[in-house]
Amino acid sequence: MIAALALIGLLSACGGGGGESTMTPPSPAPAPAPAKVTLAAGNYQNAVTLSMGVASSAYAYARLGVMVVDQWLDVPITFFPVLACPQGGTLSLELSDKNADRSLDPGDTLHFHWDNCRTSGVAATGVVRVELLSATQIPGGRDYQFTVIVSELEVDVGSRPSTTVNFVTQVHYQRTATANETTLSNAVFSSGQVVGDPGTSTIALDYYQDSATQTYQYTTNGSVTSNAMGGELDFSTPAAFTGVIGEYPSAGRLTVSGNAGSGARLSEEGAAASDSASVFAAVDTNGDGVIDASEAQLAWSSVVPVQLFAAFSDQMAIGVPMP
């Protein structure tokens, strides 16, 4: 898209042939920045849930990329399969093989084409590409860098409105005998960030799991523009979410900032700190430091599914619009 807009701009600047005028048409005014959402008692829980949701969506596509590289790295690919999906439709694979060795290695891209592929109540049509940038053996494991590109992936989940996902992220994944870490430095949804809200978002994320201590650390930050909420929000985790693998966090905080100094938070404090299934949520509507509305024990399950915090190998589903 950026390249296309740049070419259009150059053509406009060049103008037509003939005539003596050297003037060029004025550039169109930039689109106005989306308005910030004013956080209040009626929407702050939606704001913290959406912020956690877009981050977990981005992580899910990164994890899909890890799964692809793990499964196909250095595996001879002697054909391009077309696979039947469990409830109809097909999934086909193609390899862009830079060095023509018939296997996925650095410089290659594996393309997945869903064609009305239906399984477990989800139907998908579109393309996901995983471009492998580097793959290194390290003591006890591997180190990958790759790019995931989701292009016009239309997803239907049950009776919900269809969602069209466009997304790109570069991922750094490292696995050793006792730990794994997934880092997304600049993940971007231009559509399809969560089911039912065709807004946009930019996300950074780091997720570390230590299997020796059975603990994890999860941090994220970014911005989200929500059609459903009518504007933009910024979010971050000034205190990392931490806990026991397989359980919701026992510590940590997410903050969300909106218009006119309004802010919301999701944190392990108060009564929620001693209840593994709940989290404290609150809103300050004007930035004066006083809580104007709160939920002492908001159910974590209403924010993200517990599978997000499962051991990496057991994260089967994270409740996002994926085939």
Image (tube, rainbow, N blue to C red):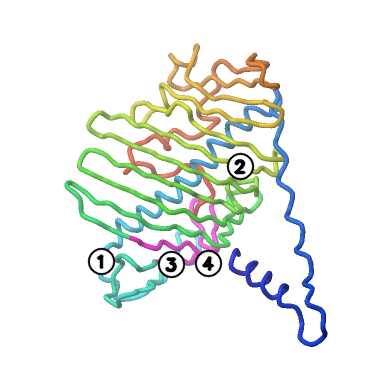
**Helix, strand or loop under label 2:** strand
**Amino acid at pointer 2:** Val
3D distance between C-alphas at marks 3 and 2:
28 Å
Q: Nearer the viewer, residue 200 or 317?
A: 200
Residue 156: x and y in percent read 59, 54
3D distance between C-alphas at marks 1 and 3:
15 Å
* Nearest-to-viewer mark from 3 and 2: 2
Which residue in the structure is indicated by mark 4?
Answer: 115
Which residue in the structure is indicated by mark 2?
Answer: 224
Q: Which residues are magenta?
A: 110-133
- Among numbered discs 4 and 2, the one appearing first in the sequence: 4
Q: Residue furthest top?
A: 271
- Is residue 205 covered in magenta? no
Q: Is residue 219 left or right of residue 123?
A: left
**Amino acid at pointer 1:** Val
- Is residue 123 covered in magenta? yes
3D distance between C-alphas at marks 3 and 4:
13 Å
Residue 253: x and y in percent read 49, 25
Residue 133: x and y in percent read 35, 61
Q: Which residue lies at the image location 31% right of the left edge and 65% below the top edge?
A: 106
Give the quadrant of residue 280. top right
Q: Badge 2, how many Cα within 10 Å: few under 14, some, many 20+?
A: many
Which residue in the structure is indicated by mark 1?
Answer: 75
